[in-house]
């Protein structure tokens, strides 16, 4: 919470409570579904950067040209906390992109929150890759917009299933 923008604190609170209570992602009491508006990229193959709408209403640049890329763009942009911080998504290959973020200090998140975030996002990315028939490794580089430093990566594998409810029996 200390790292959050004052305007984002209320959106973060359900995530912190879920992590503390071991509640599965997206099942926060009173929080409703994560995301909201669908961010649809009207991309065409070979097109230059496209403006994609985000839930916060800002325009995000993306050069997505495949169904998988557009679906990943939508997944990222519709995340309630992460999405509004995205400045651009640049796809350099079929399953490789650089996601530039403004004021999202992912590398300063407490480890449990960071790993929960990565688990949830990687599970969703893996599901989209499977649905789209993407067999190439996925590499979504998360870059700080100010410093241009790579803060982390999403690969559709790391931490997947790590935060699923455990059978105590």
Image: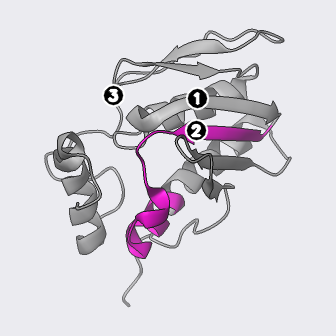
Q: Which residue is mark 3?
A: 36
Q: Residue furthest front?
A: 147
Q: Residues within 10 Å of mark 3 (few under 14, many from 20)?
A: some
Q: CA distance from mark 1 to mark 3?
A: 19 Å
First of labels 3, 2 by sequence position = 3
Residue 162 position (above or below residue 53): below
Residue 14 position (above or below residue 43): below
- Is residue 28 visible in the rendered structure shown here? no
Is residue 90 shown left or right of residue 82? right
Residue 68 position (above or below residue 1): above
Q: Which residue is mark 2?
A: 100
* Mark 2: secondary structure: strand
User: Residue at position x 54%, y 40% from top?
Assistant: 145
Q: Is residue 17 magenta?
A: no
Region of the chain picked out in magenta, as a range: 95-118
- Can you tell which quarter of the image residue 32 is in? top left
Q: Residues within 10 Å of mark 1 (few under 14, many from 20)?
A: many
Task: Kindly indicate whether the residue at mark 1 contacts the one at mark 2 (C-beta within 8 angstroms).
Answer: yes
Q: CA distance from mark 3 to mark 2?
A: 21 Å
Q: Nearer the viewer, residue 85 or 21?
A: 85
Q: Which residue is mark 1?
A: 88
Is residue 143 shown left or right of residue 164? right
Residue 35 position (above or below residue 2): above
Residue 16's spot in the image, x, y percent? 25, 63
* Mark 1: secondary structure: strand
Quadrant of the drawing holding the C terminus: bottom left
Residue 4's spot in the image, x, y percent? 27, 52
User: Residue at position x 66%, y 55% from top?
Assistant: 156
- The mark closer to the camera, 1 or 3, is 1
């Amino acid at each position: 919470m200390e790292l959050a923008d004052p305007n984002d604190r209320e959106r973060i609170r359900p995530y912190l409570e879920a992590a503390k209570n071991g509640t599965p992602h997206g099942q926060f009491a009173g929080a409703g579904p994560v995301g909201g508006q669908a961010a649809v990229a009207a991309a065409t193959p070979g097109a230059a950067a496209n403006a994609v709408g985000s839930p916060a209403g800002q325009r995000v640049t993306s050069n997505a040209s495949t169904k998988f890329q557009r679906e990943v763009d939508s997944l990222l942009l519709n995340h309630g906390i992460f999405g509004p911080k995205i400045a651009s998504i640049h796809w350099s290959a079929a399953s490789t992109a650089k996601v530039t973020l403004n004021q999202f200090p992912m590398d300063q998140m407490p480890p449990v929150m960071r790993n929960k975030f990565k688990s949830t996002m990687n599970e969703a990315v893996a599901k989209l890759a499977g649905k789209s028939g993407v067999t190439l490794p996925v590499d979504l580089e998360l870059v700080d917009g100010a410093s241009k430093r790579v803060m982390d990566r999403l690969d559709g594998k790391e931490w997947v299933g790590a935060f699923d409810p455990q059978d105590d029996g």
